Image (spheres, grey):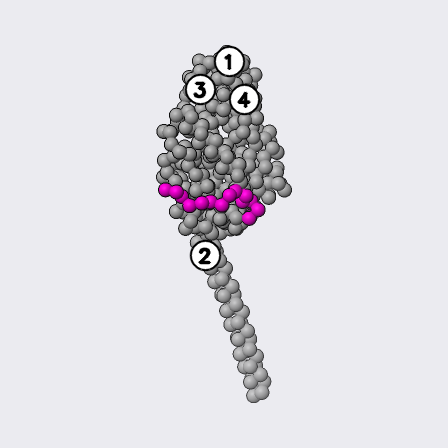
């Protein structure tokens, strides 16, 4: 009788132990399932407009290494031929955040004020360049007269072109200007449909490579380039400061990775853009990749505003107060030392 009772007690204990094990396994399985299902659902979707330009290397590293996801963001990357296109998509509601040179921003500032600059990424001061075909009879600056020259109007390429021509004693009226984006300019100069192109890396470098000895490369003359900035709509930025902070924090993390692992960063940038690593290496080490908001940004935009007015590219009007186009709070929250610009003031309108 005692043996039967003992056996029964052992069976009961074993059964309880088995139930506990099964329960623990089931709970563990359910928890794992919840993690697998909830993780992507918890990520916030962000539509970002980028370009193949070298200044976008931090964003491309962040995308390739899934750094945005670590900050809770599911970033979809739209790769455009130029920042002007990305900026237009942003204003049309097709993007949430975009990267662009300040030239298109300055142009639009005379028409509307519903967007903010969130940060500026330092870049190589000889990013823009003029490349020409030798067989078009171009060997000197004077030879550009009467030639078909491509440039994307309303972009930093046009600002660089006008500044470069002024420096060299010419103006755009001396040439037959063709409004063309950078990828199309590259194909056109390779095929001989244009004689020269004002553009930026990597397209100028690819043009030189394709033309070989037939390429004439003109010096940049240390002309100060426009600023590369990250922008968003005012409504989106003010209603989603936490998203903007997470985005900027990720860019800073990617910049730190670039400094530690430049070779891997070049590889990531190359994969996204389809530009050879050897070409990228020509300029990569000259980049700073510092995310800031400084006083030089204001000076840059004011200089370009005077340029568009002086050349009649916009109707003559007062230069906008560009402090009203800058939203420093998210970057200040992420890195207070990166914001050295004067505090933004209220819009006068």
Name the quadrant of the C terminus.
top left
Q: Residue at x 59, y 37 (%)?
A: 288
Is residue 173 at all visible to an observer of this figure? yes
Asked if the residue under mark 4 is in contact with the one under mark 1, i.e. CB atoms within 8 Å, the reply is no
The mark that comes first in sequence, 2 or 4, is 2
Q: Residues within 10 Å of mark 4 (few under 14, many from 20)?
A: many
In this rendering, the answer to whether 119 lies above or below 148 is below
**Circle 2 residue:** 38
Q: Residue at x 51, y 72 (%)?
A: 19
Instruction: Give x and y (percent) for residue 1.
Output: 56, 88
Q: Give the alpha-carbon distance from disc 1 to disc 4, as whole Å.
A: 20 Å
Q: Is 348 contained in the magenta span?
A: yes
Instruction: Name the residue nearer the viewer: 111 or 27.
Output: 111
**SS type, badge 1:** helix
Give the numbered dot on residue 142.
1
**Of the residues tagged 2 and 3, which is closer to the observer?**
3
Q: Give the alpha-carbon distance from disc 3 to disc 4, as whole Å.
A: 23 Å
**Of the residues tagged 1 and 2, which is closer to the observer?**
1
**Circle 3 residue:** 172
In this rendering, the answer to whether 105 lies above or below 327 is above
The mark that comes first in sequence, 3 or 4, is 3
Instruction: Give x and y (percent) for residue 117.
Output: 46, 41
Compared across the picture, whether 145 is left or right of 257 comes to left
**Of the residues tagged 1 and 4, which is closer to the observer?**
1
**SS type, badge 2:** helix
Instruction: Give x and y (percent) for residue 12.
Output: 53, 79
Is residue 69 at all visible to an observer of this figure? no
Q: Residue at x 51, y 43 (%)?
A: 342
Q: Is 66 contained in the magenta span?
A: no
């Amino acid at each position: 009788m005692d043996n039967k009772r003992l056996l029964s007690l052992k069976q009961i204990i074993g059964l309880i132990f088995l139930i506990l094990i099964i329960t623990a396994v089931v709970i563990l399985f359910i928890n794992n399932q919840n993690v697998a299902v909830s993780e992507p659902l918890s990520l916030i979707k962000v539509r970002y407009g980028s370009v193949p330009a070298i200044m976008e290397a931090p964003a491309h590293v962040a995308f390739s290494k899934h750094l945005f996801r670590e900050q809770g963001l599911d970033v979809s990357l739209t790769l455009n031929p130029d920042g002007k296109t990305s900026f237009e998509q942003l204003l049309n509601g097709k993007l949430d955040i975009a990267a662009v040179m300040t030239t298109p921003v300055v142009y639009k500032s005379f028409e509307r004020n519903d967007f903010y600059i969130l940060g500026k990424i330092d870049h190589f001061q000889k990013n823009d360049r003029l490349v020409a075909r030798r067989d078009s009879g171009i060997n000197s600056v004077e030879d550009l007269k009467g030639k078909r020259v491509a440039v994307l109007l309303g972009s930093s390429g046009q600002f660089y072109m006008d500044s470069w021509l002024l420096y060299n004693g010419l103006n755009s009226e001396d040439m037959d200007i063709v409004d063309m984006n950078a990828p199309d300019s590259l194909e056109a100069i390779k095929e001989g449909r244009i004689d020269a192109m004002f553009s930026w890396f990597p397209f100028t470098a690819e043009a030189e490579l394709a033309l070989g000895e037939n390429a004439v490369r003109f010096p940049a003359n240390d002309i100060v380039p426009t600023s590369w900035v990250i922008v968003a709509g005012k409504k989106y930025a003010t209603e989603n400061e936490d998203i903007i902070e997470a985005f900027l924090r990720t860019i800073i993390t990617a910049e730190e990775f670039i400094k530690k692992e430049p070779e891997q960063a070049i590889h990531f940038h190359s994969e996204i853009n389809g530009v050879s690593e050897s070409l990228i290496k020509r300029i990569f080490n000259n980049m700073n990749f510092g995310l800031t908001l400084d006083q030089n940004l204001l000076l840059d935009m004011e200089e370009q505003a005077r340029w568009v007015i002086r050349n009649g590219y916009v109707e003559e009007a007062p230069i906008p107060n560009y402090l009203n186009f800058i939203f420093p709070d998210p970057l200040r929250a992420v890195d207070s030392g990166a914001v050295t610009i004067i505090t933004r003031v209220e819009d006068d309108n």
